[in-house]
Image (spheres, rainbow, N blue to C red):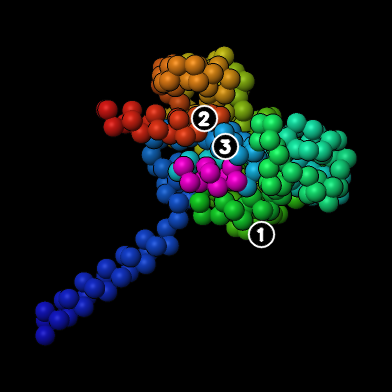
Amino acid sequence: MNLKIGLSTILFAFLCITQCYSQTTKADSILYDFNHRPEKILVAAHRAAHQNYPENSIAAIRESIRMGIAIVELDIRVTKDNKLVVMHDRTVDRTTNGSGKVEQLTFKEIRSLRLKHKDDLTDEQVPTLEEVLLEATGKILIDIDFKAAPKHIDKALALIEKHKMEDQIIFFLYDHKLSPKLHKKSPDITIMPRAHNQSEVEEILKWDYIKVIHVDESFYDNALMKRILDANVRVWMNALGKYDTMEKTERNSGFEALLKQKNINIIQTDLPEELNNFLINRKFKE
């Protein structure tokens, strides 16, 4: 009888653990790493994983998720009729088969367009912010580069709150002084202010709600970056341009060079799969 009770108890515990595990999403795992494993370098896919799909597209977001990338960086603009869409440029000329400024086109007009990948036209449409949120739920973090006028931020925050996505959002701010205002509006969203010098880093570190700072190579200093890390704040740096180009020219040369700046733990790149594989192989060799 006791043996039966014991087996029943073990089985019940196993089922409970299995159920809890099944409810853990990819985003939960990434968030755990983000908040509790500063030694792990996280990869951010610039404009999503756009090597094989159009930048800022749903397909590129899905590709980022498939690759196991931690963060997708997306650019948000607003249409003439106040619809938030994902588009890097002020105009649709470079990335679609249309022309004109995003803010001067209606959503219907933008929706009729198709996104380009390199010089080829695809079936991908310009996505809305809401579509992106739905696609990413439970799967990946989103770094929002908000390129619309500040007056539209409340609209974005409302959508994020509607879909309960606050914990999956990193909201990038070019002007760090806007951080307190945004934090007051949405205290559960992670804010990433950009620092342009040491003085701005010192000011940002006074806010205990900041979890990540976007730094620049121009003022990188090991001691300063370590101060950021010691404050339980992540250090974000770009591989875009210089280091990505080096990586394309000679494999591993760009990422090796970038990581000589040892106190960084989020890297944004146009080569997310390559960087992800590089970091896995690097960890394996240690």
Query: Which residue is identified by label 2?
Result: 271
Query: Which residue is identified by label 1?
Result: 162
> Rounded to the nearest whole Å, what is the CA distance between mark 2 and mark 1?
32 Å
Q: Residue at x 62, y 52 (%)?
A: 133
Q: Secondary structure at mark 3?
A: loop
Determine if the magenta segment contains residue 133: no
Residue 51 figure quarter: top right
Vertically, is 284 above or below 36?
A: above
Q: Nearer the viewer, mark 3 or mark 1?
A: 3
Q: Residue at x 43, y 20 (%)?
A: 251
Q: Secondary structure at mark 2?
A: loop
Query: Which residue is identified by label 3?
Result: 52
Q: Main secondary structure of the magenta part?
A: helix
Q: Residues within 10 Å of mark 1 (few under 14, many from 20)?
A: few
> Rounded to the nearest whole Å, what is the CA distance between mark 2 and mark 3?
11 Å
Residue 38 lies, in percent from the top left, at 40, 35
**Closer to us: 79 or 273:** 273
Q: Is residue 69 left or right of residue 10?
A: right
Residue 231 lies, in percent from the top left, at 45, 32
> What stretch of residues is rendered in magenta?
59-67
Vertically, is 136 above or below 216?
A: below
In the rendered structure, which amino acid carries the disc numbered 1? Lys
Q: Nearer the viewer, mark 2 or mark 3?
A: 3
Residue 13 lies, in percent from the top left, at 27, 70
In the rendered structure, which amino acid carries the disc numbered 3? Asn
Vertically, is 261 above or below 54?
A: above
Q: Nearer the viewer, mark 2 or mark 1?
A: 2
| Quadrant occupied by the C terminus | top left
Q: Residue at x 65, y 56 (%)?
A: 161
